[in-house]
Amino acid sequence: MMEIMHTDKAPAAVGPYSQAVKTGNLLFCSGQIGLNPATGEMVGTTVAEQAKQVMENVKALLENAGATFDNVVKTTCFIADMKEFGNFNEVYAQYFSNNKPARSCVQAVLPKGALCEVEVIVEL
């Protein structure tokens, strides 16, 4: 059975999609960009600043489902400029200190001019 998940501690969807969907023991979280959940405004002007907000938004989705970063099995990361990979990775690594999930990372044009975006698949 599929369950649509929502929390006010992460930004509201900016399109026709859900923040996260739970099915069985899996949670699929939509990509998070560096939006402040309270204001809907982009946080920061650097990849590192936005990546921190991205990961805090992911954390909010995980906590809403009773999970942590240790439960993440796969991430897909999007970066507007692959030259910023190192800066992005420094922040990303802080959130995955215990668990190193499978990961893809690609360069992409992102919504709202975001510099990075992260989506996760979680085992609950």
Image (cartoon, helix red, strand yellow):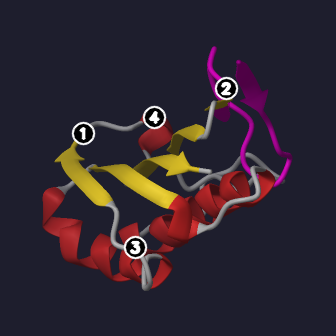
Furthest residue in direction top, as rendered = 16
Which residue type does callout 1 highlight?
Answer: Ala
Q: Mark 1 points at which residue?
A: 108
Which residue type carries mark 4?
A: Pro
Give the extent of the magenta segment: 1-21
Residue 92's tag is 3
Q: Which residue is drawn at 27% across and 49% down?
A: 80
Residue 118 coordinates in the image, percent (x, y): 43, 51
Q: How far is the residue under mark 3 from the one under mark 2?
A: 23 Å
Looking at the image, how many numbered discs can be counted on the residues? 4
Per the rendering, the mark at residue 111 is 4
Helix, strand or loop under label 2: loop
Residue 17 among those drawn in magenta: yes
Residue type, numbered disc 3: Tyr
At label 1, counting other C-alpha atoms closer than 10 Å, the crowd grade (few under 14, some 14-19, many 20 or more) is: some
Q: Do the residues labelled 1 and 2 touch (CB within 8 Å)?
A: no
**In front: label 1 or label 2:** 2
Q: Residue 18 carries which label?
A: 2
